[in-house]
Amino acid sequence: MKRKERLFAVLACALFAFVFMGAEKANKAAKPKGEPIRAKIGVISIITGAGASYGEAITNGFKLALDEVNAKGDVNIDLKIEDSTGKAEQALSAAQKLINSDQVVAILGPTLSTEMKVVAPEANASGVPIMGTSTTAQGITQIGKFVFRNSLPESQAIPASVGKAVKKYNIKKVALLYGNDDVFTKSGFDTMKEVAEKLKLKIVTIETFQKGQADYKAQLTKIASLKPDAVFCSALYNEGGVILAQARKMGLKVPFVGGNGFNSPKVIEIAQEAAEGLIVATPWFGEKNDPKVRAFVAKYEKAYGKKPDQFAAQAYDAFHIMANALKAAGSADRSKLRDALAATRNFQGVLGEFSFDAERDVVMAPNVLIVKGGKFTLFN
Amino acid sequence: MFLEQLINGITLGSIYSIVALGYTLVFGVLGIINMAHGEIFMFGAFVGLLIVSKAGAPLPVAFLGAIVVTASMGLLLERFALRPLRTRPGASHLASLISTIGVSILLENLAHKIFGSGNHLFETPFAEISFKIGPVTVYLVQVLILLISLLLMAGLALWLSRTRAGKALRATAENLETAGLLGVDTNRMITATVVIASAMGGVAGVLVGMAFNYINNQIGLSMGLKGLAIIIFGGMGSVYGAMAGGLILGLSETFVVAYGSSGYRDAIAFVAIIVILLIRPQGLFGQAPAEARR
């Protein structure tokens, strides 16, 4: 029953999208319309296991975009979704299956940078374009010329948020806290440390934690006793939300500057009042006064009953970038698609204006946000 | 800071102890490791969460509800995953280990299906009650956790050594067939053991929710692994060993972070376990294997 309802909602959305885009399509319809370009695109995401909430948002973003794209009719995409369970070896075997037996034209995913570092060389060697939608560690697209991403790397996001926070709160001493078992949070930490050193901040301590940890009191008690002006914390939202709640509860009230992984309404859902004052830099801002963003948020909420987070938004844009490139390539050919992808410039998505640079990495401007009154607001 | 960290360590250690008690009880009687214990514990936490945060009922109801649900899960586990293997001749002892692993995977995914992934806020006004001793803030929950774990340990030790049922349980642990011949209803004793161990897991689950404010469907795995390490370290099947082992692991983890580096947290805790096992291979409170059990 639930399934049926959801299907209905998706169909309704697709129909809505169709009507909505009718106006735009009218002038293009003059061109004789042939058969749509049919293509199989593989998705590798975390469907089960510790990171399943990220995979859920990402695949939801893809599915929403898929319905829009297929309804539009220029291209007809068949999604093949595989589960990586968050493990690199599982992601690799999923990629091999997609490349060799499903014969996909391109791959979207995998979710974690750790997985991408294993999967991307394989896809690159097979000449299959692969685009990460949530992989923000350093050196991803440098793996090869078939490797892309549309997720803003932390090396671009963190200097923006740290810079603004330091100026506003006159920060001199900081404590660093990060998850040391994930490439993503580790590379965020490296950037934070680099930025802190560049700004000549005194680092009073560096503490670590592991994914899925329940108790952070030992680290937080230590940090509180050293009295820093701020905490720079590189964590995913699941751990980050809990860290914030436990920190505030034990009386550590200084500003927290988070990495990219902190940017999700779920942080507020998890930490509630404790999330107040959290500062993040992010490509995705769901409250932005932009008709494209508002339409996406409304559609997503209608289909899945919750607000889209950064992961859903990035997936949604990535799918549209892929579909546009496929249309530009003219056929479902792996290397033609690669060239068309690499030529993507000034794409207008829900994340804002997006281009690939010469190394197929992201060019876009991040927003710096602060949690105020239970939601993310622009931080000035 | 020392006192605060000491309290942090004792709280964490007490929770480890209660989880480990569940493992040690089943191991002591059945000689098997119940790999599903961590997941049963996680279900206890979720049931507590539903009762306290969603239904707004008082805490004792949450404990009761968690106990009822986890105890019945223990009953089902014994009936469908352990007994069929025990009664069949020629079944390897490893078979039940594998079947409990199967149950644990099933339960973890079931929790994912029912409760979703990610952290859930475990909200209870009781968790906010605190008092000050000098400069140190102590939460009533932390005291309660220590008390419950001590009570469970003492109760279990007394029950095993002083009561008729405890005697029957020990006889069953000693030798299943002989105990059966002497009139002990061994099936009932084993079921009782698994049910009691599971109910303790349920209690531990609610305590974890109260102590850390958050639960997710993965806590069974991480707490379960710690619980396993503790029973090896404390002595397989020893009630006091589970208690002491839990506290030692909790305190050492906390103090490594406080006065060393958090990166070495697990490393140092487990190096300590290895060193103790090298000196006392049977574990802290384990009995040296004078005669082979089987």
Image: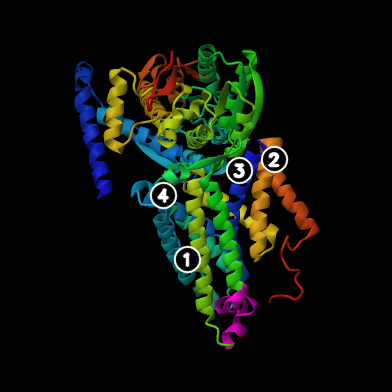
- Decide which of B199, B190 is in the foreground and name it: B199
Q: Is residue B89 left or right of residue B60?
A: right
Is circle 2 on the same chain as circle 1? yes
User: Quick check: can you spot residue A41?
Assistant: no
User: Helix, strand or loop at disc 3?
Assistant: helix
Kindly indicate whether the residue at mark 1 contacts the one at mark 4 (C-beta within 8 angstroms): no
Q: Which residue is mark 2?
A: B256
Q: Which residue is mark 3?
A: B8
Task: Give, as a three-letter code, the residue at label 4.
Answer: Leu
Q: Residue furthest right?
A: B279
Kindly indicate whether the residue at mark 1 contacts the one at mark 2 (C-beta within 8 angstroms): no
Query: Magenta span covers which residues?
Result: B161-181
Is circle 4 on the same chain as circle 3? yes
Q: In the image, which disc is placed on residue B87?
A: none
Q: Which residue is mark 4?
A: B49
Quadrant of res A352: top left
Q: Earlier in the sequence, mark 1 or mark 3?
A: 3
Q: Nearer the viewer, mark 3 or mark 2?
A: 3
Q: Earlier in the sequence, mark 2 or mark 1?
A: 1
**Main SS category, magenta section:** helix
The residue under the point 24% across, 33% down is A13
Q: Earlier in the sequence, mark 4 or mark 1?
A: 4
Q: Which residue is mark 1?
A: B74
- Decide which of B284, B216 is in the foreground and name it: B284
Quadrant of res A30: top left
Q: Quadrant of the N terminus of chain B?
A: top right
Measured Cα–Cα span from mark 4 to mark 1: 20 Å
Q: Nearer the viewer, mark 4 or mark 1?
A: 4
